[in-house]
Image (spheres, rainbow, N blue to C red):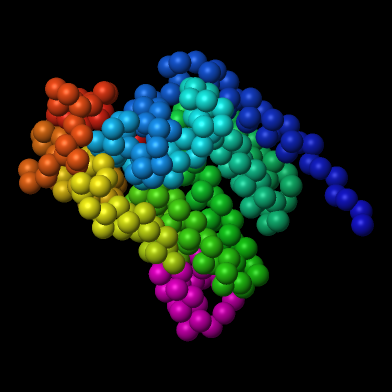
Amino acid sequence: MKLKKPDIALILILLAALILNTYNIWQDDAANQYYLAAVKSMTKSFHNFFYASFDPSGFVSVDKPPLVLWIQTIFALVFGVHTWSVILPQALAGVGSVFLLYIMIKPRFGKGAARISALVMALTPIAVAVSRTNNIDSMLVFTLLLGTWCLMRAVKQGKLILLLAAFGIVGIGFNMKMLQAFMVIPAFLLFYLVAAKAKWRKKIASAVLSLIVLTGVSLSWALVVDYTSADSRPYVGSSQKNSVLELAFGYNGTERLLGQTTGNSRGDMNGFGADMQPPNGNGPAGGDAQGQNGGGQPSGGGG
């Protein structure tokens, strides 16, 4: 069997992306200190790891789902808690996004167009800048591109399992940055319904099944947390009612996507909902956890 020659241009583009994405990530000020503090806490115990606890005592969680922080924590456990070790997953995800763009474009538009697209993404300043931080966006972009690739394969091959995988991967994205991952869903559905070669009844049934998978994957962690006794887990940071679902559809949902304000979840609540108490009575002495603002909530991740 004759092996295909590697695309040298692609290799050089990926190498350039890797160099750009990892440049200066060892600098102390390269990391978002909010997420870095959470990773340090999450290395202390499985309880803190699972609930994405912001502080070592398990007093309050960060204002995002835990998946990317889980990955960062695993890297920190392997390589130690360093600026570069928590940024490295995002840098690699940025390189992976460049590769995914290449393999999605090449079959339809050819190697030249795929190379140009990959090069543009590798050199796009904002893509590089985001990949050189421990913010969540680079990993989310990679995840959604992976879902897009599965969707394109599903349409081309007519395989339901690939369609379910595409929507399941978007559900994984929900566990990275909540409703922001769902922004691709209308395009996913439209593309499948228009491009898939199947009868309309089958397409609609497949789409409904995909949305069920999407919902199940998306809400898996949130429901586990919300149905856990409040005194057995951290308070859900930036929520008003100690609920991940409220966080997902409020502060990390409509407030971000539509610019709405349903009651600032930072400084106007004294850190908790009016009818809630800190879990376990674990509040740090003096009322504030390390890195928290005057309202008792940790300063947000900014994204």
Name the residue at 46% across, 28% down. Answer: 133
Asked whether, in this view, residue 206 is left or right of residue 239, the answer is right
Identity of the residue drawn at 25% across and 37% down: 60
Percent across and percent down for residue 105 are: 65, 51
Magenta part of the protein: which range? 190-212
Vertical relation: 140 (above or below) 120: below
Residue 95's spot in the image, x, y percent? 61, 37
Can I make out residue 35 in this image? no
Q: Is residue 164 visible?
A: yes
**Residue 283 lies in what quarter of the image?**
top left
Q: Nearer the viewer, residue 6 or 283?
A: 283
The location of residue 29, given as percent across then percent down, is: 43, 17
Kindly identify the residue that appears in the image at 69 percent across and 41 percent down.
115
Left or right of 176? Residue 233 is left
Instruction: Please name the residue shown 52% across and 25% down the image.
Output: 80
Prevailing secondary structure class for the magenta stretch in the rendered image: helix
In this view, the residue in front, 24 or 156, is 24
Q: Is residue 263 left or right of residue 212?
A: left
Furthest-left residue in view? 274
Q: Which corner quadrant of the image does residue 256 belong to?
A: top left
